[in-house]
Image: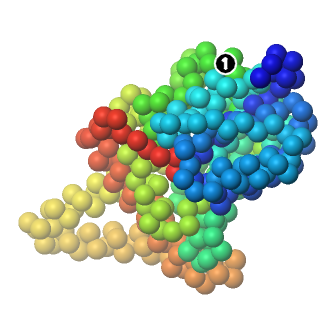
Amino acid sequence: MNNTIANIIKVSIIIPCYNEEKTITKLLTGLYGQTYPHHLTEIIIADGLSSDGTRENISEFCNGHPDIKVIVIDNPQKTIPSGLNLAIQAANGEFVVRLDAHSIPASDYIEKCISDLENNLGDNVGGIWNIQPSINSWIGESIAKAASSSIGVGNANYRLNSRSGEVDTVPFGSFRKSYLVDIGGFDENLLTNEDYELNTRIRKNGGKIWIDNSIKSTYFARPTYKKLASQYWRYGWWKAQMLKRYPNTIKWRQALPPLFVLALGIILVISIVQPIYLSLLLAIIFSYILILVIYSWIIGLKNRKPAFIIGIPCAIITMHICWGSGLLVGLFTNPPKNSINKLVG
C-alpha cells in the first residue's frame, strides 16, 4: 500500500477468522452499513487458511462492494492471538477495532467506538453483546438465552446491558494502534482468554477499560450443546492458565462454577465411604436443577416458548459444569508444546 492510501485510513477493523462461511458475509455487510465513512476505514481479515467457502464468500463480497477496502492475510498458526497480531502489524489506521467473524456490529458501532477513544474515555473501549441464536431451533434459542442470563454468566457487564463505565473487560475492543503496540499486543501463548489477559495488562499499567452501553453488537451463540460444552471447557481451561499468571483477577462469577463442581466431587467421594452423604449430594443437585427450571419456566412464559423449561437448564448446566471442570483441570495441567487452537471463537 502506498503512503497516500495509508494516510487516508483512520480506522483498521481487524478480524481473526477460520471456516466462517456461514457468518463472514453477515459481518462484512454489517461493516459496509456503518455510519463511519468507508474511505477512512479498512477491514483486515487474518484467515487461518480456511478450508470451507470463507475466502470465496469474502471475494464475492469484495466484488460487489468495491468502495470499501478489504484485505485478507494468511494466519498460518491458526490461533486467535496470532491472527490479531498479524492484523495489527498490517493495520494502517490510527485506531484499531477488533471484531469476530461470528458477530455483527450495530450500524453506529465504529463511529461510537472512535468517538469514545477520541474523548479519552478509555484506552480500550467496547460495548454490549446482543446474543442471538445461530440456528433457528429451540436448542439454539435456549443456548442464546442462557448465555445472556445473569444466572448463567453472573454479572458479566457486556452480556447484561449494564450501564456505561469502567469495567474489567469488554468483548472485542477498540484501541489507538500506538497504545496497542506499546502494551505488547495479544499474548500468543494464551490461545483463549486473550482479550481478558490484554485488559489485565492494560489495567495493571494504569490504563482504563470503558464499556459504553450504547455501543452494541450481535454475537451468535453456539448452535448445539456439544459445541457449547467444547467452548466452555476451553474457556475454563485457558482461564486457569491465565490465573497462574494473575491469580488475583478471578471474579466471583468465575469462581462459583469450579467451586460447585469441586463440592459435588468431594461430597460424591465422601458418600462412597459414608452413604448418608449421598442424600446431601442429591439434595444439592435437586435444588440446583429446581432453581434453573423455575427460572427457565418464567423465561418460557414471557417468550411463549415452553421448550425453554428444558432447553435453558440444559444449557446453563453445560456452561457451569464444563467451565468449572475445565478450570479445575487447567490448574493442574499445562498447554502441550506446539499446541494449536483453531479459530473457533
Which residue is at a point 56% across and 67% down the rendered structure image? 223
The reply, left or right, for residue 260 in relation to residue 179 is: left
User: Percent position (x, y) of residue 20?
Assistant: 61, 54
Q: Nearer the viewer, residue 330 or 120?
A: 330
State which quadrant residue 69 falls in.
Answer: top right
Residue 49 lies, with reference to residue 206, above or below; the image says below
Q: Nearer the viewer, residue 165 or 73?
A: 73
Number of marks:
1
Which residue is at a point 82% across and 16% down the rendered structure image? 3
Residue type at the position of mark 1: Tyr
State which quadrant residue 144 falls in.
Answer: bottom right
- The answer to whether residue 254 of the structure is visible from this angle is no
Q: Residues within 10 Å of mark 1 (few under 14, many from 20)?
A: some
User: Percent position (x, y) of residue 121?
Assistant: 76, 27
State which quadrant residue 117 falls in.
Answer: top right
The reply, left or right, for residue 55 in relation to residue 288 is: right
Q: In the displayed image of the protein, which residue is found farthest to the left?
A: 273
Residue 317 lies, with reference to residue 243, above or below; the image says below
- The answer to whether residue 32 of the structure is visible from this angle is yes
Q: Nearer the viewer, residue 32 or 281?
A: 32
Residue 315 lies, with reference to residue 167, above or below; the image says below
Which residue is at a point 54% across and 72% down the rendered structure image? 312
Q: How is the image coloured?
A: rainbow
Residue 119 lies, with reference to residue 30, above or below; the image says above
- Residue where numbered disc 1 is placed: 179
The reply, left or right, for residue 98 in relation to residue 314 is: right
User: Percent position (x, y) of residue 265?
Assistant: 24, 59
Instruction: Tell me the quadrant of the picture where the N terminus can be found.
Output: top right
Q: Nearer the viewer, residue 312 or 345?
A: 345
Mark 1: secondary structure: helix
Which residue is at a point 58% across and 57% down the rendered structure image? 52
User: Percent position (x, y) of residue 158?
Assistant: 65, 47
